[in-house]
Image (cartoon, rainbow, N blue to C red):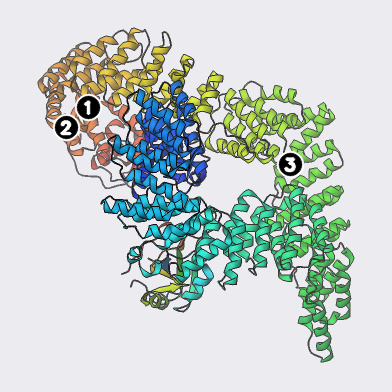
């Protein structure tokens, strides 16, 4: 883990995919809050269609939260299994541009 | 298929696409990918058909449109498309499939597709599959007209068509034709006859056909039995069906699953779904069952037989589920989606969903169905589905309505938006802030018109009907926030009426939102509105606070804080009377915050007396108290308004003393104060306040801040005073505010004397050009176009883009179409005027005023003027046209362009530039239709194509021109370009023959073309051709500036390329020796040879040439080749080689002229090669700069500054120079080297 403890400004990010269209930020935030404090939850909507793209970035304020989430076998929300993986630490914006790059080391 | 390379598409990326999804991708990439896409799409169609037995309408249309764009559908491609319009489209209703086929047929024919019998047969098949009723005899006569011979397949299908209608007589007629032509009668014909008899109701005869067949020597096969099965299915005769099935099975004949599916379809369609299960039991679930069954399902749904469809779907073998992970166990998406597409009723959908859910086939069928409804923007269905979901206890969320709102947003459909919001409300889903800000309020961003404001009122009414006052609040806040400062001011009256209206409607909004609105209005400096806006604030707090206050007072507790809250609340309510009363009552307990709010309130209510009294009162309590900036400014404003000038100035002074922070908005506020004073006509007030502000250093002088000084006079219509004031401003502050308005007034008044004075002043202070522009704009603005025209035609006047932009934007902002049009027209001849930019302004205004006729006319004018539009301009134009439902004329519709171009040859040239590919296509198309263009058009197109490297296309155009236009020859420039392109493509023989044609037709090639050709020939070692070209241009060479050395050097290179080094040296060496004997002739340079040899790393040749150069130095004293070689070494960065050569031939250093020229040349190269290049350069600097101490010193400084390693020889030389001049040497002198004297 490259993360250094104690740097409070860092966000520990989780990349979530295969999110059903019925869910929105609120549900995801509530769900992931069980693993730790969620600082950010970004679920971009397509302004052209009004649907989101099924991808979300959840930022925990501690490494622990991220850990807990990664440790759970499967994440099933409203009957649908979500795909999760750790997101390489970067700015939210660049993650968006290069979605799906993950390093599990 | 012209197959243009990618770079050319870039040129044509301007044409916007209009269709479907495509639009969402960037236009550019689409154009680039178009060619590949086409093949890709065809493959996709093919694989889709093979894999699934169906294609979607969208894919089919996309391929069709691509085919149209690319221009020339091959007959095979046409066949492929036509054949796809039948049962391959199970999702499309039958009649629409046939319409599609007809549309494709017609369009491809227009594009030049040639149809043969195969196409007609394909069309027939489509007719049969789609149960399309048509007249076979007419069909035959159409084929005859087109000179296409019907074949056996044609007749068979026509018989089938008759039989499907139960028309045995018609079928017999065709059968007669077949017999006459001695065509074999196949099983297919008999199968049709089975159907034919069955459809007349005569099953006996239908059965009889089988024995007729046997008599004719044809054993009935599966096709015939299938026809019989279908016939019984149509009658609902399950017993006979079963018998036949058994019989065939006994005969070990096979019905494929696909055949049985046809029977199922017939049963369902004829109204006997109860027998479907019987047939299902005969299914063998072969490979390919699933796609076939899916097609059957889709087809049944399309034709309104969804119950049978569902039955089939449920019987899908469970093998499907085994390949999937547990999380995605949702089956039936395709089923639900197609039901939504075909508008099945809600009850049906609900029933399917329930069953799917019960059978555990789908985890969330209702949600998925809703998704489909939203995706296809079926608002009613979506809302009903949500109702159902609510009843089922499924959660509903605000974002479910976003896809619908997005649609209405795009259409600006307010009613639709409100409808959705209302429905959501009824469903108990309150839209959240995101819904409002992203999907609702953006509908109303266009508040240009009063109509929009009326809509606002309607909307508010609706909001109130369905929602909370909070919603109204959000809405109002966003509305005002979206308006600019000046918009709010301009619409102040509307907004006021509007607030009154709301008050009448008893609208009250929550305090927090009211505060937000209040703050916004405060920033916009509209105190009047704030007052009115206060009407709709809630009463929240005031009475409660009063009670609290009384209570505290009674308990003898400190009341300061609550008192302040009460005052602030009363202020927020704009209740000045009460606030003042409360203050008077509890004066001893008043704190600064309360006073500040109260002062501001009084200012807003124009109550200057109380405001000042309050201020003094609070200062008596604490003289160090400072109000915030805006409250001071409000005081200044109200004091100014009441003519209490001295007090106002004192406040300004106090602001300075107390060091009140000044922000940008403060300066704007100053302007508003001054401007308000100017509007009231108080010359002294304006002047003194302005002076004080500047003197106190509260703001810096600017044109804006100074303009009230002039405004005050203009308001009184005292133009002379205004002019004086502006001249005064220029003297004092260097600004010339409102000159344009002054000039306009003077022109309107016909005051030529003063006008002259103003012009003289401008001319003197700002130059004649500026003055001319000023007066030009003034004439334009006052409608004196004749005078304006005279001014702008002043000889020597040139375009000033910034000024033109200023005026254009002024016109755009004020919606002055006529003025702008005149400016654009008048500047047509203006030197260096960017015409495109001018038309851009015009189109911008057209778009804003939504005037498509004007936009269209402007587009025509641009064509007349041969202006090539930039992409943004075209987009503006396209938008304006599209917004008004007009066709966009420059879409890639070949026929439209063809029409336009043939109508107006001039336009063709413009089009050729913009739409080169299109032009090319048009031209080929035109050729087919014998439409010809003027010769210059062809040359232009050829040049454009060549410039993009499209040689083949250019040649094709050339050939067309040559064969169709008598005496057509390519002009000089196009020919030269052709030669260059041919050389680049390595078609040297062609290039030579082009050159030959050029020379023979007495044209003059551009030198570059000849140079490129010779150089290419040299690289090939083609001595013979070099000689030939030299001969060709013999007479031209001198006049077009071709150097003899071009031929010499390239001959040398050709020898080298042929590995004939001795020949090369033998050829060139004498030239230098003889040149020496004739000192008048210029010394030839073979730098080019050296450079090429170095570049190509031809080391043996380099050695040979180097030896030659040294020999020339040592034996003949000819330094030129050695020096050239030295410099080429330097240039190529081969420092050591340069150094060795210099050591061997020291005299190179004395070739000052050559070296100087080299330095001069290389110093012009970008990046200051001279200073940053390798240190080798310095070998000759000191030599060149010999005895020029000043230059040497400068150079040394530069070298030092650039941090470049200083060569010791250079230092040595410099030291010598310095010493000779008796100056100190500021560095350590290096030891003696080879070059020391």
Left or right of residue B517: residue B936: left
Specify the label residue B737 is tagged with.
3
Residue located at (43% from left, 51% from top): B233
Sooner in the amino-acid sequence: mark 2 or mark 3: 3
Which image quadrant for residue B1003?
Answer: top left
Residue located at (52% from left, 41% from top): B95
Task: Give B409 or B565, whichever is nearer the viewer.
Answer: B409
Chain letter for mark 2? B
Task: Give B115 or A27, whichever is nearer the viewer.
Answer: B115
Sooner in the amino-acid sequence: mark 1 or mark 3: 3
Chain letter for mark 3? B
Confirm whether circles 2 and 1 share one chain.
Answer: yes
Q: CA distance from mark 2 to mark 3?
A: 70 Å
Tag 1 residue = B1123
Q: Classify mark 2: helix, strand or loop.
A: helix
In the rendered image, residue A55, in percent from the top left (x then y), is placed at 45, 63
Tag 2 residue = B1141
Sooner in the amino-acid sequence: mark 2 or mark 1: 1
Mark 2 and mark 1 residues within 8 Å of each other at the beta carbon: no
Which quadrant is home to the N terminus of chain B? top left
Q: CA distance from mark 1 to mark 3?
A: 65 Å
Residue located at (86% from left, 56% from top): B641
Res B1083 visible: no
Q: Nearer the viewer, mark 2 or mark 3?
A: 3
Mark 1 and mark 3 residues within 8 Å of each other at the beta carbon: no
Res B440 visible: yes
Report the number of numbered marks: 3
Chain letter for mark 1? B
């Amino acid at each position: 883990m490259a993360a250094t403890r104690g740097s409070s400004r860092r966000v520990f990010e989780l990349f979530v995919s295969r999110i059903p269209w019925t869910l929105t930020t609120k549900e995801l935030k509530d769900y992931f809050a069980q693993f730790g404090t969620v600082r950010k939850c970004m679920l971009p909507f397509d302004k052209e269609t009004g649907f989101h793209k099924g991808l979300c970035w959840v930022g925990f304020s501690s490494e622990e939260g991220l850990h807990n989430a990664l440790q759970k076998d499967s994440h099933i929300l409203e009957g649908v299994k979500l795909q999760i993986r750790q997101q390489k630490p970067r700015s939210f914006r660049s993650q968006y541009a290069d979605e799906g790059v993950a390093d599990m080391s | 298929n012209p197959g243009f390379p990618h770079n050319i598409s870039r040129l044509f990326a301007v044409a916007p696409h209009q269709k479907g999804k495509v639009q969402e991708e960037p236009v550019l990439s689409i154009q680039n990918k178009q060619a590949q896409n086409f093949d890709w799409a065809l493959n996709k169609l093919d694989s889709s058909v093979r894999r699934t037995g169906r294609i979607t309408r969208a894919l089919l249309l996309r391929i069709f449109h691509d085919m149209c764009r690319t221009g020339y559908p091959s007959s095979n491609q046409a066949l492929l498309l036509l054949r796809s319009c039948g049962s391959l489209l199970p999702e499309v209703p039958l009649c629409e499939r046939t319409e599609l086929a007809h549309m494709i047929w017609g369009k491809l024919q227009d594009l030049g597709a040639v149809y043969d019998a195969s196409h007609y047969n394909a069309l027939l098949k489509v007719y049969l599959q789609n149960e399309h009723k048509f007249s076979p005899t007419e069909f035959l006569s159409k084929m005859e007209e087109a000179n296409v011979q019907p074949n056996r397949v044609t007749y068979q299908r026509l018989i089938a068509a008759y039989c499907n209608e139960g028309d045995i007589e018609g079928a017999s007629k065709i059968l007669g034709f077949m017999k006459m032509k001695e065509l074999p009668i196949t099983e297919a014909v008999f199968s049709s006859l089975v159907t034919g008899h069955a459809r007349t109701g005569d099953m006996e005869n239908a059965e009889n056909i089988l024995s007729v067949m046997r008599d004719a020597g044809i054993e009935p096969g599966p096709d015939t039995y299938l026809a019989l099965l279908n016939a019984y299915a149509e009658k609902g005769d399950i017993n006979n069906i079963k018998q036949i099935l058994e019989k065939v099975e006994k005969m070990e004949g096979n019905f494929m699953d696909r055949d049985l599916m046809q029977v199922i379809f017939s049963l369902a369609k004829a109204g006997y779904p109860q027998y479907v299960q019987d047939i299902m039991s005969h299914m063998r679930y072969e490979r390919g069952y699933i796609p076939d069954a899916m097609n059957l399902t889709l087809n049944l749904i399309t034709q309104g037989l969804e119950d049978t469809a569902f039955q089939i779907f449920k019987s899908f073998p469970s093998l499907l589920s085994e390949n999937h992970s547990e999380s995605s166990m949702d089956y039936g998406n395709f089923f639900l989606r197609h039901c939504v597409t075909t508008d099945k009723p809600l009850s049906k959908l609900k029933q399917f969903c329930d069953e799917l859910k019960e059978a555990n086939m789908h985890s969330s069928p209702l949600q998925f169905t809703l998704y489909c409804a939203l995706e296809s923007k079926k608002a009613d269905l979506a809302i009903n589905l949500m109702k159902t979901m609510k009843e089922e206890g499924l959660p509903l969320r605000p974002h479910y309505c976003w896809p619908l709102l997005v649609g209405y947003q795009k259409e600006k459909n307010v009613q639709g938006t409100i409808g959705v919001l209302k429905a959501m409300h009824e469903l108990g889903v309150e839209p959240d802030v995101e819904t409002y800000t992203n999907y609702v309020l953006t509908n109303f961003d266009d508040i240009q018109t009063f109509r929009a404001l009326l809509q606002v009122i309607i909307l508010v009414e609706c909001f109130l009907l369905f929602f909370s006052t909070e919603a109204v609040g959000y809405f109002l806040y966003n509305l005002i926030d979206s308006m600019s400062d000046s918009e709010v001011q301009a619409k102040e009256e509307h907004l006021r009426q509007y607030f009154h209206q709301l008050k009448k409607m008893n609208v009250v909004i929550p305090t927090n939102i009211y505060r937000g609105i209040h703050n916004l209005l405060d920033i916009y400096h509209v105190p009047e509105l704030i007052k009115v806006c206060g009407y709709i604030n809630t009463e929240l707090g005031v009475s409660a606070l009063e009670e609290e206050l009384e209570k505290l007072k009674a308990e003898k507790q400190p009341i300061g804080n609550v008192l302040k809250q009460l005052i602030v609340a009363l202020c927020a309510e704009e209740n000045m009377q009460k606030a003042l009363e409360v203050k008077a009552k509890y004066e001893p307990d008043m704190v600064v915050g309360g006073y500040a709010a109260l002062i501001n309130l009084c200012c807003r209510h124009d109550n200057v007396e109380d405001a000042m009294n309050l201020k003094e009162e609070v200062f008596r309590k604490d003289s160090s108290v400072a109000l915030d900036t805006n409250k001071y400014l409000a005081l200044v404003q109200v004091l100014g308004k009441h003519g209490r000038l001295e007090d106002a100035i004192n406040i300004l002074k106090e602001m300075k003393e107390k060091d009140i922070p000044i922000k940008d908005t403060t300066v704007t506020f100053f302007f508003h104060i001054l401007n308000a004073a100017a509007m009231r006509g108080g010359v002294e007030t304006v002047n003194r306040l302005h002076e004080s502000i500047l003197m106190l250093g509260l703001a810096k002088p600017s044109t804006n801040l100074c303009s009230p000084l002039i405004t005050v006079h203009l308001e009184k219509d005292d133009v002379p005073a205004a002019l004086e004031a502006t001249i005064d401003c220029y003297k004092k502050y260097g600004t010339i505010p409102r000159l344009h308005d002054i000039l306009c007034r003077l022109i309107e008044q016909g005051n030529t004397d003063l006008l002259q004075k103003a012009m003289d002043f401008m001319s003197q202070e700002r130059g004649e050009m500026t003055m001319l522009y000023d007066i030009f704009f003034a004439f334009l603005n006052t409608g004196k176009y004749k005078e304006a025209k005279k001014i702008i035609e002043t000889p020597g006047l040139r375009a000033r883009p910034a000024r033109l932009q200023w005026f254009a934007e002024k016109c755009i902002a004020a919606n002055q179409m006529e003025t702008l049009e005149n400016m654009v027209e008048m500047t047509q001849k203006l030197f260096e005027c960017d015409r495109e930019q001018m038309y851009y302004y015009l189109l911008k205004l057209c778009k804003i005023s939504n005037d498509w006729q004007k936009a269209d006319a402007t587009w025509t004018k641009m064509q007349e003027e041969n202006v090539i539009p930039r992409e943004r301009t075209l987009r503006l134009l396209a938008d304006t046209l599209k917004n008004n439902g007009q066709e966009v004329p420059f879409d890639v519709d070949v026929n439209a362009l063809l029409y336009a171009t043939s109508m107006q040859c001039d336009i063709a040239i413009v089009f050729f530039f913009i739409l080169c590919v299109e032009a090319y296509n048009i031209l080929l198309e035109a050729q087919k239709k014998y439409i010809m263009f003027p010769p210059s058009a062809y040359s232009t197109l050829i040049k454009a194509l060549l410039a993009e490297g499209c040689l083949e296309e250019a040649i094709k155009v050339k050939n067309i021109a040559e064969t169709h236009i008598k005496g057509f020859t390519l002009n000089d420039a196009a020919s030269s370009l052709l030669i260059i392109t041919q050389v680049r493509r390595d078609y040297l023989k062609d290039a030579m023959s082009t050159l030959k044609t050029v020379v023979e037709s007495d044209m003059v090639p551009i030198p570059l073309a000849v140079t490129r050709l010779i150089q290419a020939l040299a690289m090939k070692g083609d001595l013979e051709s070099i000689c030939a070209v030299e001969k060709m241009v013999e007479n031209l060479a001198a006049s077009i500036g071709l150097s003899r050395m071009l031929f010499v050097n390239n001959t040398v290179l050709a020898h080298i390329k042929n590995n004939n080094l001795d020949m090369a040296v033998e050829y060139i060496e004498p030239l230098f020796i003889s040149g020496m004997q004739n000192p008048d002739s210029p010394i030839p340079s073979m730098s080019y040879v050296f450079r090429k040899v170095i570049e190509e790393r031809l080391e043996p040749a380099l050695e040979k040439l180097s030896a030659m150069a040294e020999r020339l130095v040592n034996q003949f004293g000819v330094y030129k080749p050695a020096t050239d070689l030295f410099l080429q070494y330097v240039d190529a960065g081969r420092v050591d080689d340069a150094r060795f050569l210099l050591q061997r031939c020291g005299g190179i250093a004395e070739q000052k002229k050559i070296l100087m020229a080299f330095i001069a040349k290389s110093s012009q190269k970008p990046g200051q090669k001279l200073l940053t290049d390798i240190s080798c350069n310095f070998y000759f600097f000191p030599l060149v700069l010999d005895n020029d101490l000043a230059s040497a010193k400068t150079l040394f400084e530069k070298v030092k500054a650039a941090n470049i390693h200083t060569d010791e020889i250079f230092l040595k030389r410099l030291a010598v120079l310095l010493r000779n001049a008796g100056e100190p040497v500021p560095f350590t002198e290096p030891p003696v080297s080879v070059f020391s004297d």
